Image (cartoon, grey):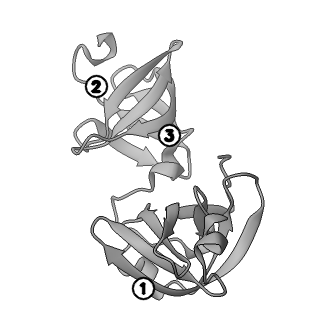
Amino acid sequence: MAMDPQSVVVAEILRPRGNRGELLAVSQTDVPGRFETLKKANVRLADSSAEVQVEIESAWAHKDLWVLKFAGVETIGAAERFRGAELRVPMSERGKLADGEYFQSDLIGCEVIEKATGKILGNVTGWQQYGGRPLMEVQADGREVLIPFVPSICTQIDVAGRKITVNLPEGLLEL
């Protein structure tokens, strides 16, 4: 779905759950208590760019997922409309991070500059994560390079200036 700079995705809705209009969702936020305290949000439906405002009656953890109950959604049929949708909140309502932590979405598009040479390597285009530290996807010289997002490599991060200075280990660009 299209990137929306005015709002941020806090959950991806998978499918209806049970027969009372509940929905099963995957959290896209690390903010503790985010769903328990969220009362209103927008849902971008999967089949269009239309957004629907919803009131969240309840939310609770179920294994690695979340069960969400929206006001006025009482049946499986009514819940089906939200299959594959995104639960979004305005950018102004997204969680706060500790110093030295960054939202990955804020770093997409940043220039990546090699500290030793001052050369612009490319721009962050996305992220990959396989259980360890995230890897920045950087479009460099017409190909994708994966750079570990760790303090020893990403030595300076300037979100406002849209720049990330990196101290690359020898041979990383050849991988």
Across and down, in percent, residue 40 comes to: 62, 83
Element on which disc 2 rests? loop
Query: Which of the two discs, 3 and 1, sits closer to the camera?
Result: 1
Q: Which residue is mark 1?
A: 36
Residue at which label 2 appears = 168
Q: Looking at the picture, how far across and down is residue 172, in whole percent?
A: 27, 18
User: Real-space Cα distance between discs 1 and 2?
Assistant: 41 Å
| Amino acid type shown at disc 1 | Glu
Q: Secondary structure at mark 3?
A: strand
First in sequence: mark 1 vs mark 2: 1
Looking at the image, is 151 positioned above or below residue 90?
Answer: above
Find disc 3 in the rendering and name its residue: 163
Secondary element type, mark 1: helix
Badge 1: residue crowd in 10 Å (few <14, some 14–19, many ≥20):
some
Asked if labels 2 and 1 touch by Cβ distance under 8 angstroms, the answer is no
The three-letter code of the residue at mark 2 reads Leu
Does residue 128 appear left or right of residue 125 in this picture?
left
Query: What residue is at 56 percent from the left and 52 percent from the top?
Result: 160
Depth check: give the residue in front, 78 or 85: 78
Residue 16 image point, x, y percent? 52, 67
Q: Is residue 146 in view?
A: yes
Cβ atoms under marks 3 and 1 closer than 8 Å: no
Q: Residue type at mark 3? A: Lys
Q: Nearer the viewer, mark 1 or mark 2?
A: 1
